[in-house]
Every structure is written in structure tokens, then in C-alpha cells.
């Protein structure tokens, strides 16, 4: 028998390692379940409770919630997300130029980067909790919370795309004696703007979900409708609100993804049918290949 | 004017097209309309600073914050919710994720149904799940764990099925050509190549879950948010701020650890 036909030796230690990982996961599971105050009858009862509610949710009472103005609330969530994104985008853009290591000096970029990190660490919901006593209940609190939180992520993404540009145009502007502002405007801005605007749209998609949630604590939008129906255990109405929200989220995701593709890949190549096929696969999650 | 040899004309300035102007005007109009709808009020930016409520944020009562029963215990609960839902969600995501990739799906109907269902599940925001679960099975961490399990599953299958889509199909074809049944072929043909990514995604989902479980308590689903909501209702903003500092530090540490682990894995 030659060496070539010999069976390769199985890797060693895998059994022990697998066992160790299994034990760690098991301990983690037992520890966390112990804190959830789970009793056996609650555990066994949960599926049937969930099922009972699911059955009451069908059929959704669309006419009733529409008469109460739920459709307007859905649109209010979209407005909150849009204005929040606009605020975040406008404030984060100049900051990003001051945070990128290839265009900004170190004394300004370190504090601004830390500012981005600090903002990202506080969830929108917590920001809204702090803002509500100051602005009062209503959509403006939610808009501000989303706007402030968006500065963190949008600033980070924009900084990263500024840092990955080609340095040639900057040198060209510098060699003609241009000032810092001109070099930003004519060398950096044209290179990064397509990427950054697609990030803005992506953030808008995330913010639509966030603004729906913000309504649950009274910061405007569709969340308050869901909460009030669930509090009164009006499940047909709650499922109608849920369906409207899902429809809105999926529509915006699909449209925004199509626009982002157009921004990044440009108008050349691909025909209308391939574009609608891509949009369809965004909407349904199914790839037709 | 024709350029003389050795000299070039200045390139023509790109002209503003009617469509560009139209799109910009439409976006502006929509923004102004939306701003009116949400009650856009720039005066908030400076009036905020003269609000008497700010005094209530300071000084932070550190002895209250570090008293073990007040913050520490609910924080442990937050971790327990995040841990169990990451383990359950990511465990379930393994078979569902395989069903959602055209490379590894057992059959066409499974593929279509799992993709469509998961797409809808993902469109429901995490706290909506939490509120639904609180209504269905009662207030507390148990409901929060269920909600985050569903949420982790929805996020994880998306990330994992995309990894499987991009995996090398060669070993799987070899396993099938040798007559392997479906599950063993996946186990030996695909799983070893995608497993490091799977673990990295699971760590990322754990990070998301820690962040999400901090706010679960605001809708009655247990964890640190419950205390946050209670103190907010008593207008004890100094305590709220103290808790926020602790949350900030812990979330930051977890993120750093998780990011460095993920870098080593991939």
C-alpha cells in the first residue's frame, strides 16, 4: 500500500474540545434559565398561550384600525425616520471629514471618533426616555432620538469611506495650492458621496424599524397603536397594525435597496426586467437564479 | 475654437440635468412636509439647555448604583436573557439556515416557505415581539427570552444562509456523489467550511441581544430596563444616568471582546 492511498489521520483533540464546548454551553444555558423564573407549567403552557392568541389574531380587523387612523400613524413613523435620518446625515457629514485620518489632524479626529462611539453605545429608546421629559410626548422626541443616534453610525461609516479613498486627487488639489476646504470639496467629496448617500438610505431602513418601536414609549408613530390594542387584548386590531407595519417596512426596504443599487452600480448595464427581478427578490427574500 | 497642438482645452463643466433638479426638489419638498408632520422645532436645540429637569440628572448617586440589589441583579437577568436566547436562536438557525440556502435546502418548497416566513419575521421590530410575548405569556424575563430567541433566529438565518450560499460546493458534491444522505452530507461537506463564520455571526448576534435586552424592560419583558423604567417614572433621572453609565461601560467591554474574538475567527 502506497502512502497516497492511506486514509488521513483524524484531527486530534476534537473529541475533548467538543466536550468542553458542550459543557460550557450547557452551563450557560442552565445558569440563564435559572434566572428567568421558569416553572414547568409556564414552559408547557407557553406554546398553547401563544397559539390561543395567534388564533384570535386572524382575521385582522383592518377596517376598524384604519378608522382609528392607524394608517396615518404608520406614515408618521416614516416621517420620523426620514427627518431623523436627515438630521443625522447633515450633522454627521462635516464631523466625518474631521474624523478621517487621511484628511484631519490627530487633535480633532480622536475626540470626534470617541463622540461617535459614545453616541452609538446609547440605544435610541434610552435617548428617547431622556428626551421625553424635555420635549414632551410626541413625534419630535422620537425624531430627535433617532437623529442623534444616527450621527454615531452614519459618522463612523462615512469616516471609513473617506479613509478608503484614492489620495491622488487630494495631492492634485494641494499641488495647485488649494486650501483644505477646496481639497475636501473637489478631491474627497466626489469620491465618497455615492457611498455615503447609500449609507444614508440604509440607515433610513434601520430607522423605520426604530421609529415604529419608539411609539411604544410614546415618542410618536405606529408603536403606540400596537401597545394600546395589546393592552386591551384586542388581538384582531393588534394583528392589523402589525400587518400594516410589516407591509410598510418591507416596501421601504425594497424601494431603498433598489435605489441604493442604482446609486452604487450606476445606470449602465442591466435591463428593466433584471432590475424588477432583483427588487422582487428583495421583497420576498427568494432568489430566482 | 480648435486647440493648438500641445495645448488642451479645459474640460466642459458637467451640466445640471432637469432630472437631477427634479429629484432634489422632490426630496426637499418631502423633507419639509415630513418635518412639519413631526413638529420639527429647532428652538428645542437651545431651549433644551434651560430646562429645569437637567438639575435632576446630577449628581449621580453612586452608592445607590453599586448597591447589589438595585442594578447588579437586574443586569444579571439581562445577561441571562441575552445568553439563553442567543444559544436557542443560533441553535435553531443551523437547520433553518441550511433550508434557506439553495445549495443545501432539502427541497424547493422548504426553501420557499422558510425564506418567505423568515423575511416577514425579520420585518417585525424586536420590541414588537417583546410586547407580543409579554401579552401572550405574561410580564417578565421569560417573555423577553422568547422574543429575543425569535429575533436572534431571524437575524442569524439571514447571515448564516448567506455564508452557506457563498461556500465552496465541491465537498458537498463529493459527499452526495459518494451516496451520502442529506444530513450527513451537510455535516461533512458544508459545516466544517462555514463553522468559523457561524461562530462569528453567533457572537455578533449575542452583541445585538445584549443591546436589545437592555431596553426590553421598557415594555415589561424583564432585565435592567425594568429598573430604568421604574426610576424614570419616579423622575429619578440621576439614578437613570448612573445606570446608563454602567450600561455604556458593560456594552462597550462586550463589544471589544466580541470584535477581537471575531477577528481571530475569520
Image (spheres, grey):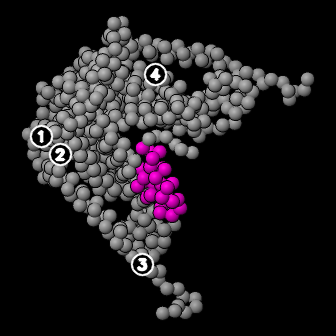
Disc 2 crowd rating (10 Å Cα; few below 14, some 14-19, many 20+) is: many
Horizontal side of residue A130 vs B175, given as left or right: left
**Place of residue B156 in the rendered image (x, y in percent of width and height, measured from the top left):** 46, 31
Residue shown at 26% from the left, 46% from the top: A78
Q: Which residue is mark 1?
A: A136
Residue shown at 28% from the left, 29% from the top: A59
* Image vertical order of residue A131 relative to residue B212, above or below: below
Q: CA distance from mark 2 to mark 3?
A: 42 Å
Q: Which mark is residue A140?
A: 2
Cβ atoms at labels 1 and 2 below 8 Å apart: yes
**Place of residue A123 in the rendered image (x, y in percent of width and height, measured from the top left):** 30, 36
* Image vertical order of residue B148 relative to residue A19, above or below: below
Q: Secondary structure at mark 4?
A: helix
Q: CA distance from mark 1 to mark 4?
A: 40 Å
Q: Which mark is residue B87?
A: 4
**Place of residue A193 in the rendered image (x, y in percent of width and height, measured from the top left):** 40, 60
Mark 4 or mark 3, earlier in chain: 3
Q: Chain of mark 3?
A: B
Q: CA distance from mark 4 to mark 3?
A: 58 Å
Horizontal side of residue B257 vs B134, given as left or right: right
| Residue stretch rendered in magenta on the structure | A256-283
Where is residue B86, by image quadrant? top left
Amino acid at each position: 500500500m502506497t502512502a497516497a492511498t492511506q486514509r488521513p489521520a483524524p484531527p486530534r483533540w476534537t473529541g475533548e474540545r467538543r466536550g468542553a464546548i458542550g459543557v460550557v454551553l450547557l452551563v450557560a444555558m442552565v445558569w440563564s434559565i435559572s434566572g428567568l423564573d421558569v416553572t414547568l407549567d409556564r414552559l408547557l403552557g407557553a406554546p398553547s398561550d401563544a397559539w390561543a392568541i395567534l388564533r384570535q389574531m386572524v382575521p385582522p380587523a383592518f377596517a376598524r384600525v384604519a378608522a382609528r387612523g392607524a394608517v396615518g400613524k404608520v406614515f408618521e413613523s416614516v416621517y420620523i425616520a426620514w427627518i431623523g435620518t436627515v438630521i443625522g446625515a447633515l450633522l454627521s457629514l462635516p464631523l466625518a471629514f474631521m474624523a478621517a485620518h487621511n484628511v484631519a489632524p490627530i487633535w480633532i479626529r480622536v475626540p470626534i471618533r470617541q463622540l461617535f462611539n459614545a453616541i452609538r453605545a446609547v440605544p435610541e429608546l434610552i435617548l428617547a426616555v431622556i428626551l421625553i421629559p424635555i420635549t414632551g410626548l410626541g413625534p419630535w422626541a422620537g425624531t430627535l432620538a433617532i437623529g442623534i443616534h444616527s450621527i454615531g453610525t452614519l459618522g463612523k461609516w462615512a469616516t471609513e469611506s473617506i479613509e478608503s479613498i484614492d489620495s491622488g486627487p487630494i495631492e492634485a488639489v494641494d499641488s495647485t495650492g488649494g486650501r483644505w476646504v477646496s481639497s475636501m470639496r473637489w478631491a474627497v467629496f466626489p469620491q465618497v458621496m455615492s457611498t455615503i448617500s447609500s449609507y444614508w438610505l440604509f440607515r433610513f431602513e434601520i430607522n423605520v424599524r426604530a421609529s415604529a418601536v419608539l411609539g411604544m414609549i410614546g415618542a410618536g408613530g405606529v408603536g403606540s397603536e400596537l401597545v394600546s390594542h395589546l393592552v386591551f387584548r384586542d388581538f384582531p386590531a393588534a394583528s392589523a397594525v402589525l400587518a400594516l407595519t410589516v407591509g410598510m417596512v418591507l416596501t421601504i426596504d425594497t424601494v431603498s435597496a433598489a435605489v441604493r443599487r442604482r446609486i452604487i452600480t450606476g445606470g449602465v448595464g442591466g435591463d428593466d426586467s433584471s432590475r424588477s427581478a432583483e427588487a422582487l427578490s428583495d421583497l420576498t427574500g427568494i432568489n430566482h437564479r | 475654437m480648435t486647440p493648438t497642438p500641445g495645448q488642451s482645452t479645459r474640460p466642459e463643466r458637467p451640466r445640471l440635468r432637469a432630472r437631477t433638479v427634479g429629484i432634489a426638489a422632490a426630496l426637499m419638498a418631502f423633507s419639509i412636509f415630513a418635518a412639519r408632520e413631526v413638529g420639527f422645532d429647532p428652538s428645542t436645540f437651545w431651549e433644551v439647555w434651560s430646562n429645569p429637569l437637567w438639575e435632576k440628572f446630577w449628581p449621580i448617586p453612586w452608592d445607590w448604583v453599586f448597591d447589589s440589589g438595585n442594578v447588579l441583579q437586574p443586569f444579571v437577568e439581562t445577561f441571562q436573557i441575552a445568553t439563553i436566547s442567543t444559544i436557542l436562536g443560533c441553535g435553531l438557525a443551523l437547520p433553518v439556515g441550511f433550508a434557506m440556502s439553495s445549495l443545501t435546502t432539502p427541497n424547493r418548497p422548504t426553501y420557499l416557505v422558510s425564506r418567505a416566513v423568515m423575511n416577514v419575521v425579520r420585518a417585525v421590530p424586536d420590541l414588537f415581539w417583546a410586547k407580543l410575548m409579554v401579552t401572550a405569556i405574561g410580564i417578565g424575563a421569560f417573555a423577553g427570552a422568547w422574543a429575543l430567541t425569535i429575533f436572534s433566529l431571524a437575524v442569524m438565518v439571514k447571515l448564516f444562509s448567506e455564508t452557506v450560499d457563498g461556500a465552496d460546493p465541491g465537498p458537498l458534491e463529493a459527499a452526495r456523489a459518494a451516496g451520502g444522505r442529506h444530513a450527513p452530507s451537510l455535516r461533512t461537506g458544508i459545516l466544517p467550511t462555514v463553522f468559523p463564520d457561524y461562530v462569528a455571526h453567533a457572537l455578533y448576534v449575542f452583541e445585538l441581544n445584549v443591546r436589545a435586552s437592555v431596553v426590553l424592560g421598557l415594555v415589561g419583558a424583564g432585565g435592567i430596563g425594568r429598573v430604568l423604567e421604574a426610576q424614570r417614572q419616579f423622575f429619578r433621572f440621576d439614578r437613570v444616568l448612573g445606570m446608563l453609565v454602567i450600561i455604556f461601560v458593560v456594552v462597550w467591554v462586550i463589544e471589544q471582546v466580541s470584535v477581537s474574538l471575531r477577528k481571530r475567527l475569520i
